[in-house]
Structure formats: C-alpha cells, structure tokens
Amino acid sequence: MLKRIHFLLLSIFLTLSSLLFPWSGHESYTYLVVKSLNLNLDKLVEIRPYTYKETRVYNTKYYYTDDFAGQRKFFDPLNDGKFPPDPSPVDGKLPAWQILTIYAQFPDFGMDEELNLSPLQSLIGNSQGVRHMRYKLGLIEAFEGDKSFLYFVDISKEAFAKGDEYWGYRFLSYALHYMEDLFQPYHETPGTFWEVVRSLMDKKTKNLLNNAHYAYDNYLVYLIHYSKHSEEVRKLIINTPKRRIPSNYEALINEVMMYGYSRFPEVHKHIKAAMGDILIERVPTIDDYQKLEAEGKLDRLYKVTKEIIVVMTGTIKAFLEDYLTTYAQK
C-alpha cells in the first residue's frame, strides 16, 4: 500500500515536468564568474578533435563535437550583442575562459532529449529533465542532475590527465551547467506538497507551477541583461568571494542540491506574490518583468535571488579554483 501511495505522488509531481526548463543565462553568468578568477584562464588552448569513448548515452543528432567558437551558432547576442564576448579562434586556439563560457550552455541544446534513460521519464514525456534536475518531494526523490555533474567532472579529469586541455575545459563547462541548474530551486521541487496534489485535478494550479518554473529560469538572464539592477548583479557576480566547500565533489553537489531545495519556499512565495494571475495564463515576458520591477513588486524576489547568486557564485568559484589547480594547472 505504501509503495502505491509513493508511486501515485511521484506520478503527480512528475506530470508537472512535461515541459523542461534551463536555468537561463548559463553563458553570460559563467563568463562573469570565470573572468573574475585569477587562474590564468586567458591562456590559449589548442582546439583538439573529439576522441572519447563515453559510457553516457546521448541524442547524437545534437551532441556536437566540433568547435563553434566565434560563430554564435546556437545563441543570439543578448541585449547589446557584445556580451558575453565570443571572438573567433586565432591559429586554431582560443582562451580557456571562452571554452568554459560558450559551452556552459551546451547541455541544453538537445543532447539529453529523446532518450530512454529511466522508467520514470514516461511520466514527464521527455528525458532531459532526468539529467538536469533532482526532484525531492517529502521522502520521494527522482532524477539525476547530480550524476550529470559528477560524470563530466570525471571525464574532464580524464582529458586533462592525457594532456588534452581543450576537452578538459569543455567537459568541465558541461559540469558547470549541471551545477548551476541544481542551484535553481525549481530544479529540486515543483511546488508545495498540496499544490502538487491539487495540480492533478486543477489545470490552473498545474499551469501556475509550470510557468513559475519558467519565470524563475528567465529571471536570472533578465537580471544579468535587462533589469535596472543589471550592473549591480554583474558586479555582485564578479566581486563575490569564494566560499568554503567540501573537498569531496559528491558531497559538494549534495550540498548544492540541499541549498536549492531549502530556498524553494521563499522563492516560490515571492514568485506567486509578484506575478499572480500572470502565471496561470503564461510565462512572464521581459516587459512584464520591467513593469513589475518598476512597481516594486519584484523587490523581495530580487533580495532572495541575490542571496542565491552569492552562494552559487562563491561555491562555483571555490570549485573551479580547487579543480583547476588540482587537475588542469599542474
């Protein structure tokens, strides 16, 4: 009987994941982080061919292995068209910061879609969420965003160990993507327990939870590029110091997940209070954010999001310093 109850609850909250969401702005956020580090990331790295036999299954149609630096092949310039910078390689080389920046968005390009990864994915209609989230609802847990992070950390180590700096940095950028995803509270849980239960019977509640997830994903890229606070947010990311982290990367990513999960109630409360009925109908637009911001309705959400950005940034800076000084810059 207990197993049936668990399965029912799992089915309910997984139906909310039928639309899959990235924590937007990976390339811009990661650029600000890596350019603020004193780790010789301006060093030029030779572009190397992909020669790896991976144990991970991908949608190979979207698992690109060529280099697309300088092409803006997969993303459009945001806001001013110049940030983050994406210069073309020179003599087959590009700086390490650029590899980390442009490929941090790569896992959202489709490599995790249309796969057979878990029996649970039949409940969400797609496999991408399996790899990008780590849902927790009471005693129920699902998905493997943490394993995605650890996998790419390990294969990055393998690349650096054989002297392949290009793929060492590129695989590391994929790992950063999953770590950043797991700082997004909606990647840990879709709603409160009773909202999730109610969403099974009430379309408005289901729409609200789906659109709230989208809204917070988009809020980060809004803050970096379009908000009246954009300059403050960019400076915050640049100036945030590293924080103390576990030396064991498995313990580290577990800490990240629990932090994201712990911030969910506050983020969710402020999202709903600020955006109200908009979330029942659609995902907010940039114009919506700007109007709400001008009216002061995003002030509390902005405050808690700055706190999340500080912890996320301090954690990622500490991770990169530890990882790169240990494995990349010997």
Image (spheres, rainbow, N blue to C red):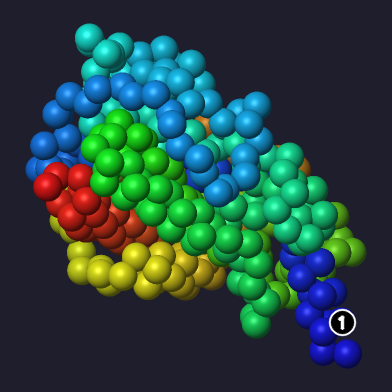
State which quadrant residue 72 falls in.
top left
Residue found at x 10% / y 43%: 38
Residue found at x 43% / y 70%: 254
Relative to 98, residue 134 above or below? below
Instruction: Answer left or right for 307 relative to 6.
Output: left
Neighbourhood count class around disc 1 (C-alpha, 10 Å): few under 14, some 14–19, many 20 upward = few
Asked if residue 308 can be seen in this view, the reply is: yes
What is the x, y in percent for residue 270? Answer: 52, 60
Asked if residue 179 can be seen in this view, the reply is: no
The quarter of the image holding the N terminus is: bottom right
* Amino acid tagged 1: Arg
Relative to 199, residue 170 above or below? above
Q: How many marks?
A: 1
What is the x, y in percent for residue 239? Answer: 16, 48
Secondary structure under the numbered disc 1 in the rendered image: helix
What is the x, y in percent for residue 120? Answer: 77, 61
Relative to 241, residue 254 above or below? below
Relative to 291, residue 317 above or below? below
Using the image as rendered, state which of residue 288 and residue 191 is in the foreground.
191
In the image, farthest residue toward the bottom: 1
Residue found at x 35% / y 14%: 70
Residue, disc 1:
4
Instruction: Answer left or right for 144 relative to 174.
Output: right
Instruction: Answer left or right for 24 relative to 136.
Output: left
What is the x, y in percent for residue 280? Answer: 74, 49
Residue found at x 29% / y 54%: 316
Using the image as rendered, state which of residue 239 and residue 98 is in the foreground.
98
